[in-house]
Image (cartoon, rainbow, N blue to C red):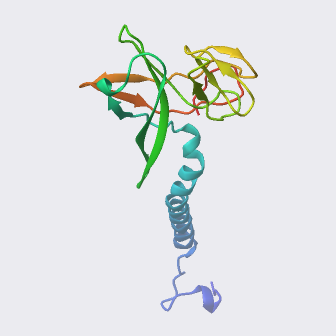
């Protein structure tokens, strides 16, 4: 019944094994490490993957009072657009072509050519929009009359609120037949 001295206690009883406490501490440290790693990695993963699934919210911007837009041919109108990204707020200047028909109907065109993204210009004498880059030609209704443009001029959502034209600015993919928002 003699046991080696290192396994006996001071009163001759066997000492309990410490592996239970050691296993628990290793498990606890492992769980805490995983939790801390997850908390630290979450913002990084969110910033890398989040923009893929997050769609930009469109907002109406004030363009111009309706009585300042003449009827008839297209009018190029510039307006400030506030772009917000998290805590950053940037004011950008955008332009749209506005056509106000005698019936009161409004059509708002993006000035960006759907072929490769150049800015179209209105030629009053020809009564056509012409892209200076590759020669696409559009009717006053936005329909393609000639050139490499794959679709008509892109129209933008708009409304009149309290006598002021409001437009939702958005961009579309160029070079494709479908009007696809970027």
Residue sitting at 35 percent across and 12 percent down?
104
In the rendered view, does 115 fall on the left or right side of 86? right
Q: Is residue 172 above or below residue 102?
A: below
In the rendered view, does 58 fall on the left or right side of 42? left
Give how far across and how far down residue 48 sits, in percent: 60, 51
Residues 79 and 126: in front is 126
Residue sitting at 51 percent across and 39 percent down?
54
Residues 140 and 61: in front is 140
Give how far across and how far down residue 170 sits, in percent: 51, 32
- In the picture as drawn, the residue positioned furthest to the top comes out as 103
Q: Is residue 56 above or below residue 65?
A: below
Give how far across and how far down residue 113 sits, in percent: 64, 29
Quadrant, the N terminus: bottom right
Looking at the image, how many numbered discs can be counted on the residues? 0
Q: Is residue 3 above or below residue 105?
A: below
Residues 177 and 166: in front is 166
Give how far across and how far down residue 7 sits, in percent: 60, 85
- In the picture as drawn, the residue positioned furthest to the left comes out as 162
Q: Is residue 52 above or below residue 112?
A: below
Residues 45 and 68: in front is 68
Quadrant, the C terminus: top right
Residue sitting at 37 percent across and 25 percent down?
69
In the rendered view, does 114 fall on the left or right side of 158? right
């Amino acid at each position: 019944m003699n046991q080696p001295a290192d396994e006996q206690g001071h009163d001759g009883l066997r000492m309990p094994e410490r592996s239970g406490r050691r296993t628990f501490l290793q498990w606890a440290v492992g769980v805490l490490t995983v939790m801390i790693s997850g908390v630290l990695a979450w913002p990084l993963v969110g910033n890398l993957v989040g923009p893929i699934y997050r769609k930009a919210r469109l907002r109406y911007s004030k363009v111009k009072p309706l009585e300042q837009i003449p009827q008839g041919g297209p009018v190029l109108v510039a307006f400030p657009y506030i772009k917000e990204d998290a805590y950053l707020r940037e004011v950008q200047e955008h332009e749209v072509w506005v056509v106000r028909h005698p019936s009161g109907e409004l059509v708002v065109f993006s000035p960006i050519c759907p072929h490769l993204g150049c800015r179209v210009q209105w030629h009053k004498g020809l009564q056509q929009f012409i892209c200076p880059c590759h020669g696409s030609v559009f009717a006053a209704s936005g329909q393609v009359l000639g050139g490499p443009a794959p679709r008509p001029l892109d129209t933008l959502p708009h409304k009149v609120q309290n006598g002021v034209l409001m437009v939702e600015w958005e961009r579309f993919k160029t070079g494709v037949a479908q009007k696809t928002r970027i």
